[in-house]
Image (cartoon, grey):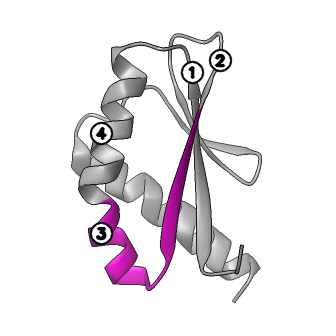
């Protein structure tokens, strides 16, 4: 994977919260990719926690369900900005 491709991890139990984040991710993915010139991939894995974690590079960036799609965009932007600072 090159420095412009980022794999976002969503980890949590198979429930409505995790499913919703997945669906929102696919809805907002193009918007964020076009703004930053990156490619976003998603990996969803099962976990024991009821509240899903949105992670990148082993670091948790958000726990739970963002209030709306717009908040998920902000979480993704924060992840991208940190990743691009680390690997310009």
Residue visible at 27% across and 70% down in the picture = 31
Q: Mark 2 points at which residue?
A: 47
Question: What SS does tag 1 mark?
Answer: strand
State the SS at label 2: loop
Q: Mark 1 points at which residue?
A: 12
Residue 30 marker: 3
Q: Where is 75 relative to 37, above or below?
A: above
> Going by the picture, which residue comes out furthest to the bottom?
88
Q: Do the residues labelled 2 and 3 touch (CB within 8 Å)?
A: no
Label 2 to label 3: alpha-carbon separation? 27 Å
- How far apart marks 1 and 2 lie (CA) works out to 4 Å
In magenta, the rendered stretch is 29-44
Q: Which residue is located at x 31 percent, y 29 percent? A: 20
Looking at the image, tell me whether mark 3 or mark 4 is earlier in sequence order. Answer: 4
Which comes before the other along the chain, label 1 or label 3? 1
Q: Residues within 10 Å of mark 3 (few under 14, many from 20)?
A: some
């Amino acid at each position: 994977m090159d420095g412009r491709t980022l794999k976002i991890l969503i980890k949590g139990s198979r429930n409505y919260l995790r499913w919703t984040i997945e669906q929102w991710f696919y809805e907002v993915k193009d918007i964020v990719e076009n703004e930053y010139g990156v490619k976003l991939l998603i990996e969803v894995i099962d976990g024991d926690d009821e509240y899903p974690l949105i992670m990148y590079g082993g670091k948790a960036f958000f726990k739970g369900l963002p209030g709306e799609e717009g908040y998920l965009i902000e979480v993704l932007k924060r992840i991208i900005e940190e990743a691009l600072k680390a690997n310009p």
